Image (spheres, rainbow, N blue to C red):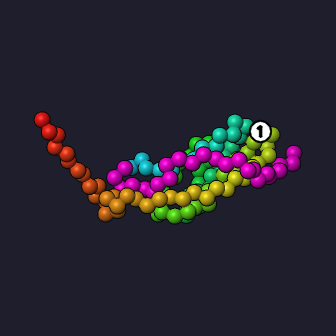
Amino acid sequence: MLLSTAYANAQFVVKGQCMQNPDCDADSTSFSDTLKTSIAWRWDFGEAGATDNRRNAQHSYMSPGTYNVTLVRTLTGGSTETLVQAVTIGELPLHFRNGLPILQFVREQP
């Protein structure tokens, strides 16, 4: 069987482009392959060799910046598609940069 590689124009879905938040353990960026005929996945998040093999993957970026995220997906029948998308990760809000969130209390008027 001959396996071919196609470079697809369709992109994957990215949600929550933020870096790790020291106040929240579960902060991450989510990546989803929406193609129904995919049967295997290899994500490369473009940061220090971080990878994942799930259809819906997550990664916590350590620094803000633009990363080239690559998805190599295997389709029914054995062919592969490679998708590359630049993902920009924003900076933490100012009040999280020192590791301590700023809390504001508002007194309600009776």
Give the structural element (helix, strand or loop) at label 1: loop
- As drawn, the residue found furthest toward the right would be 1
Residue drawn at point x = 69 percent, y = 40 percent = 35
Residue labelled with disc 1? 76
Residue 51 percent location from the top left of the image = 59, 54
Of residue 65 and residue 2, the one placed in the foreground of this image is 65
Task: Verify whether residue 83 appears in magenta.
Answer: no
Residue drawn at point x = 33 percent, y = 58 percent = 96
- As drawn, the residue found furthest toward the left would be 110
Which amino acid type is marked by label 1? Thr
Residue 49 percent location from the top left of the image = 58, 61
Of residue 12 and residue 94, the one placed in the foreground of this image is 94
Left or right, 93 with reference to 36:
left
**In which image quadrant can residue 84 be found?**
bottom right
Residue 110 percent location from the top left of the image = 12, 35
Residue drawn at point x = 57 percent, y = 57 percent = 87
The rendered magenta stretch, by its main secondary structure, is classed as loop
* Residue 62 at least partly seen: no
Q: Which residues are magenta?
A: 1-24
Of residue 4 and residue 9, the one placed in the foreground of this image is 9
